[in-house]
Image (cartoon, coloured by chain):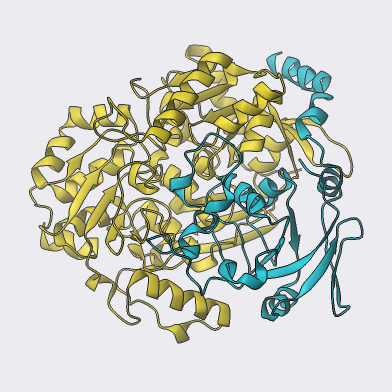
Chain colours: A cyan, B yellow
């Protein structure tokens, strides 16, 4: 996966809580056997009407946010289905960072495996960001900070192991294979 | 020191631990299906990797499969995905129950049926309802496709030790109240994200009194409360269920295993990071009115008012949900008319669910404005139900009797609820568009869904049974 450290962008405020992965990527788009090409389907039924015309009141159809690489949402983002197609569609659409007060566990993990940085901020901080219009920030993973163009700095926590994986874009399987001896030893012990 | 079952299983599966890192956890059983696995197999091929332990994997086709006219899948992309699983299993030597196999079914139904699911195991699958297997006292959780690839390649996962939560269900269930009502009541009372970061153990008298099938319904929907895994300590009910199943040892070996399983149960005096309690006596038959599983209520109530919610974000969510669902605040839940009924899914498509629904349906007719389908959870369930004549009861009443699969729970196949129409469903999610773009879902127990099919609107099963007794 692609390493991630500094990301500068206008933020896309999606002011909703409990956004489930069925909304992020609807089931009719899960039949592909590839990892790519899901961006066009991101939030499909919120972005388009039944005839496929863009719904102008949905934030992703607002031209001011077209180049945005940072999505901000309310609590419990990514709940429901474990489908990794959700982060695949977010990444393929162009987002590298998702900010929310809380994330569902499986979705959070899935982001980490795809070089998407999920940032947890305090509810009040997220609500402030959600109220902003065309507000740009710079994310710095190394420093664990988010700095607005008005100079406001937010700091965030992240597990050190996951931080290292994201900064380096490491393939986790290659790392785990180095523990082959321990895995085999475990299997021997259980068999005995 | 007294330990919970969660701590016991976790500690037994640590392959490697070191400060500043998650634990490297061994995985005992890896279940696979056609939708979340193709990219993982492709990853193995691209990196020239093998499946480390194909003998610990088991695959089936469930999400995409048609529930009628299976000979020819018309949807070409779905067909390709199904064929891809067949090819991948052949290439990597993974046991597969394909569409023609007598063991085919929803992955979370066939695991327990075959006895692959056992107490003390770590079980994963690229599906969030893997929590179902926790009913046996296993740590079972859903994973993404990258993790599927990781498990295929290494039989392990890096996992941060989760916090533990006890959900204690005291007292006894009343007449007409089902396991589904317990879990819907829990999610409604404590919220859709109460379990985030936790593994939940369900305890208490009401849980102990449940059958294994009912326990599976409860654990299945742990994820709807945000918990990746939910489990129940094994007891005699667990042991009796497993005895004689295909993948369970026999004779002396079984007795030894059974003793080991029972010893996994949470020790007296063990503590959890958090404990919540709910009384079974206060639980009514439940239905959802909104667009997530916490938006539910006892059937005797009304659709809530906006001012019932204090937080602005909840008021906004309530408004959006009612607009999507086409409901007015304050209307009686029993006045909600439905056009579809779905009895199926990994939550409620086991034999006992079909028996319960059939007992409600018997001698009645499906309401003329309702289209109702029964989708057994597996070919085994279907066969057993047919041996008991349940298919005939459903067909005589005007239900359709289908082949097994996930079907209308997520509508990846042809079983779709049309836009604007309403379904009484025994499945697990009522998200926008879950059963088809623009579809409206009301979650409930099999008995409640069966009664709704007869009446054409949501009903209180207790009243229905008194009237029809």
Q: Give the quarter of the image for residue B158.
A: top right
Check the picture and name the quadrant holding the N terminus of chain B: top right
Place of residue B371 in the rendered image (x, y in percent of width and height, measured from the top left): 18, 52
Residue at the outermost bottom position: B307
Can the viewer see residue B208 in this picture?
no
Place of residue B47 in the rendered image (x, y in percent of width and height, measured from the top left): 72, 23
Residue at the outermost right position: A143
Place of residue A173 in the rendered image (x, y in percent of width and height, measured from the top left): 76, 30
Residue A125 against residue B77 in the figure, above or below: below
**Front position in the image: B459 or B127:** B127
Counting labels gives: 0
Which residue is painted at 49% across and 31% down in the image?
B33
Which residue is painted at 79% across and 18% down in the image?
A185
Place of residue B466 in the rendered image (x, y in percent of width and height, measured from the top left): 15, 62
Q: Is residue B422 toward the left or the right of residue B237 in the image?
A: left
Which residue is painted at 80% across and 28% down in the image?
A174
Can the viewer see residue B354 in this picture?
yes
Which residue is painted at 45% across and 56% down in the image?
B183
Q: Give the quarter of the image for residue B319.
A: bottom left
Check the picture and name the quadrant holding the C terminus of chain B: bottom left
**Front position in the image: B146 or A51:** A51
Q: Give the quarter of the image for residue B80.
A: top left
Q: Is residue A184 toward the left or the right of residue B86 in the image?
A: right
């Amino acid at each position: 996966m692609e390493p991630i450290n500094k990301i500068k962008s206008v933020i896309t405020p999606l002011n909703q809580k409990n956004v489930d992965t069925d909304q992020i990527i609807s089931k009719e788009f899960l039949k592909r056997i590839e990892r790519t090409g899901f961006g066009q389907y991101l939030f499909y039924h919120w972005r388009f009407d039944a005839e496929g015309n863009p719904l102008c009141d949905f934030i992703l159809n607002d031209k001011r946010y077209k180049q945005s690489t940072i999505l901000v949402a309310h609590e419990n983002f990514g709940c429901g289905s474990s489908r990794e197609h959700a982060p695949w569609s977010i990444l393929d659409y162009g987002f590298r960072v998702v900010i929310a007060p809380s994330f569902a566990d499986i979705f959070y993990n899935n982001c980490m495996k795809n070089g998407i940085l999920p940032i947890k901020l305090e509810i009040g901080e997220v609500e402030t960001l959600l109220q902003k219009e065309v507000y740009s920030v710079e994310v710095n993973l190394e420093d664990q900070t988010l700095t607005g163009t008005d100079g406001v700095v937010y700091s965030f926590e992240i597990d050190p192991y996951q931080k290292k994986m994201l900064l380096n874009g490491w393939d986790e399987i290659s790392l785990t294979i180095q523990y082959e001896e321990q895995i085999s030893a475990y299997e021997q012990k259980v068999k005995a | 020191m007294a330990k919970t079952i969660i701590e016991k299983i976790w500690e037994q599966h640590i392959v490697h631990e070191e400060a500043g890192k998650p634990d490297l956890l061994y995985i005992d059983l890896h279940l696979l299906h056609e939708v979340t696995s193709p990219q993982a197999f492709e990853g193995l091929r691209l990196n020239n990797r093998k499946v480390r332990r194909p003998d610990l994997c088991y695959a089936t086709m469930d999400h995409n499969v048609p529930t009628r006219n299976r000979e020819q899948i018309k949807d070409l992309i779905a067909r390709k995905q199904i064929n891809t699983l067949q090819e991948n299993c052949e290439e990597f030597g993974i046991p597969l129950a394909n569409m023609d196999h007598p063991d085919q079914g929803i992955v979370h139904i066939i695991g327990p049926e075959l006895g692959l699911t056992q107490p003390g195991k770590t079980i994963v699958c690229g599906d969030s309802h893997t929590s179902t297997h926790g009913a046996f006292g296993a740590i079972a959780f859903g994973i993404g496709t990258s993790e599927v690839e990781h498990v295929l390649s290494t039989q392990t996962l890096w996992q941060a030790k989760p916090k533990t939560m006890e959900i204690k269900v005291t007292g006894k269930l009343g007449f007409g109240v089902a396991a589904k009502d317990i879990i819907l009541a829990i999610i409604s009372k404590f919220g859709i994200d109460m379990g985030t970061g936790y593994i939940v153990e369900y305890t208490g008298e009401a849980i102990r009194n449940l059958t294994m099938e009912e326990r599976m319904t409860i654990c299945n929907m742990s994820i709807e409360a945000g918990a990746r895994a939910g489990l129940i300590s094994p007891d005699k009910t667990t042991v009796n269920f497993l005895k004689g199943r295909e993948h369970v040892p026999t004779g002396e070996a079984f007795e030894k295993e059974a003793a080991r399983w029972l010893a996994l149960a949470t020790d007296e005096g063990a503590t959890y990071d958090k404990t919540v309690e709910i009384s079974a006596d206060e639980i009514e038959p439940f239905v959802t009115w909104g667009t997530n599983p916490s938006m539910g209520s006892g059937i005797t109530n009304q659709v809530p008012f906006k001012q019932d919610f204090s937080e602005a974000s909840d008021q906004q969510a309530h408004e959006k949900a009612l607009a999507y669902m086409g409901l007015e605040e304050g209307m009686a839940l029993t006045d909600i008319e439905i056009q579809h009924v779905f009895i199926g899914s990994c939550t409620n498509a086991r034999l006992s669910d079909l028996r319960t629904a059939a007992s409600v349906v018997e001698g009645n007719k499906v309401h003329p404005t309702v289209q109702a389908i029964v989708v057994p959870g597996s070919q085994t369930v279907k066969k057993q139900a047919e041996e008991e004549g349940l298919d005939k009861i459903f067909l005589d009443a005007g239900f359709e009797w289908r082949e097994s699969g996930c079907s209308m729970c997520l509508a990846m196949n042809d079983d779709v609820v049309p836009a604007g129409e309403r379904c009484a469903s025994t499945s697990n999610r009522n998200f926008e568009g879950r059963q088809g773009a623009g579809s409206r879902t009301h979650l409930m127990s099999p008995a409640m869904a069966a009664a709704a099919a007869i009446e054409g609107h949501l009903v209180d099963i207790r009243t229905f049974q008194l009237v029809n007794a």
